[in-house]
Image (tube, grey):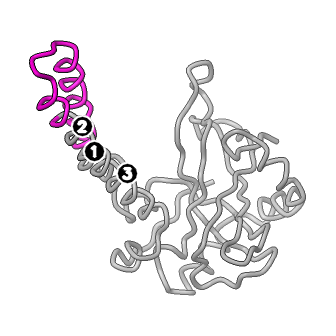
Amino acid sequence: MNNFSFDVDESYAKKNNELLRDAKRLQVSALSLGLILVAGAIALYFFANGTIWMLLIAGVLVFLALLCFIMIPVIPRQMGNAQTLYDNYELVPAVIAEVNPRDVIILALVNTNVDTSIKPQWALATRTIVRVGAHERRLGERIPSVAITGRRTVKDQDHWDEISPMPITWGTTDKDVIRSAEKTIPHELWAKLEKNRGKLEEVKKTRNNLLPL
């Protein structure tokens, strides 16, 4: 599969792209944990009364707090902005496979190969989302997405162990762009995904919501 280029509405994406919002939450968590560790270190320092082991623990807490604070600017740099994410990751077919009162689960057909030039190794990936943008909240609704690849295992560096679909609609309100993305995906891939839609529960049972086919 190929990448799909379009002009991302960055202000819209910041409000609606749940992957970017997850990164923001990680930053807030890192800040909160860092402050808690600093407070713990200060408390130990004042109550240590020269006790070496307590001072050592306080030093460790300060070190861990520094790591947390370092992560705050690193997280967005590692992830990139919305435009970068959409430009750099493969376009994939995804559909709404489950509708819940507050969210939906999308099921995507993804290629787990790190080397995308060789024959694809297909898998099913899921993501629970709240915002469906221009799409309808109904079973089978097509949600063209990009496949955000995550980590690999030490034992298998040739395949991604974690892949998360990111809907095109999180980056634009333009329905023409979304329809174009849908049409860009080959019909046979949509058909393959539809054929395997009944495997949602199997995907849910996997460790990283990724089921090789």
Residue 213: x and y, percent? 82, 42
Nearest the viewer among 12 and 100 is 100
Residue pictured at 71% horizontal, 44% vertical: 210
Residue 179 or 22: which is nearer the viewer? 22
Is residue 110 toward the left or the right of residue 46 in the image?
right
**Given the image, on which type of amino acid does mark 1 rest?**
Ile
Mark 1 packing: few (<14 Cα in 10 Å), some, or many (20+)? Answer: some
Number of the label disc, if any, that sits on residue 79? 3
| Circle on res. 40 | 2
| Left or right of 4 on screen, residue 43 | left
Query: Marks 1 and 3, how far apart in space?
Result: 26 Å
Pointer 1: what residue?
36
Q: Are marks 2 and 1 in contact (CB under 8 Å)?
A: yes
Vertical placement of residue 187 versus 201, above or below: below
Q: What is the secondary structure assignment of the residue under circle 1? A: helix
Give the structural element (helix, strand or loop) at label 2.
helix
For image coordinates 85% across by 63% down, the residue present is: 194
Say above or below: 168 vs 29: below
Q: Main secondary structure of the magenta part?
A: helix
Q: Residues within 10 Å of mark 3 (few under 14, many from 20)?
A: few
In this rendered view, identify the residue nearer to me: 177 or 12: 12
At label 3, the amino acid type is Met
Magenta stretch in the rendered image:
42-71
Structural distance between the alpha carbons of marks 3 and 2: 31 Å
Percent of width and height locating residue 93: 69, 63
